[in-house]
Amino acid sequence: MRDAMRRKIGIVAGVYLAIALLPGLWVEGFLGEDPEFADVALEGIMATAVLVVLGQIILISPSSDWRRAPVGAVLLLSVLGYVQDFLLWLLISWAFAEMESSLHVDGLGTIALAALLTRGLSLALLLLLPPSAEHREEAVAETA
């Protein structure tokens, strides 16, 4: 699996976990009722699209070659990636409020936790899943 796909899967999982777990992040149903599955799915897709598209335009993340990279560089990229996700969640909060969307984000603490979930899952998938066969062959060729 390529690095970009791992990042995208981590972002999708992070967005939906944030919506499900964080009390300050919720989807409001039609006329104040409980949200239907389609409402949650649509709002999650919209938030995921913002995170994926803008995260791909400005890519701040260690690659799956993290084992060969200096620890300081991996930590710096991880922290900068968290800051990027924080700012993207802040943008989502503001933009969705301006559009009167049914996705609501309450406060900077919720944004910080949502960014932590999103970036944490992306990094976990990036760093723990094995690299693709192509990537392993390139790594072997470089070391030989």
Image: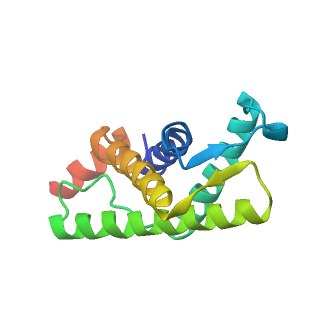
Q: Where on the picture, by quarter, is residue 128? A: top left
Q: Is residue 70 visible?
A: no
Image quadrant occupied by the N terminus:
top left
Q: Which of 46 and 31 is in front in this view?
A: 31
Colouring mode (rainbow / by chain / secondary structure / one colour): rainbow
Residue furthest front as drawn: 32
Q: Residue 56, percent across and down?
A: 54, 62
Residue drawn at the location 69% of the way across and 49% of the way down: 103
Seen in the image, is 40 located left or right of residue 134?
A: right
Q: Which of 114 and 135 is in front in this view?
A: 114
Residue furthest right as drawn: 31
Q: Residue 39, percent across and down?
A: 75, 37
Location of residue 99 with respect to 72 vertically, above or below: above
Q: Where on the picture, by quarter, is residue 79? A: bottom left
Seen in the image, is 25 located left or right of residue 33?
A: left
Residue drawn at the location 46% of the way across and 68% of the way down: 84
Q: Residue 135, percent across and down?
A: 34, 47
Q: Can residue 22 be seen in this view?
A: yes
Q: Residue 8, percent across and down?
A: 52, 47
Residue drawn at the location 38% of the way across and 62% of the way down: 61
Residue drawn at the location 35% of the way across and 50% of the way down: 123
Location of residue 95 with respect to 48 vertically, above or below: below
Image quadrant occupied by the C terminus:
bottom left
Seen in the image, is 17 located left or right of residue 29?
A: left
Number of numbered discs visible in the structure rendering:
0
Seen in the image, is 87 located left or right of residue 70?
A: right
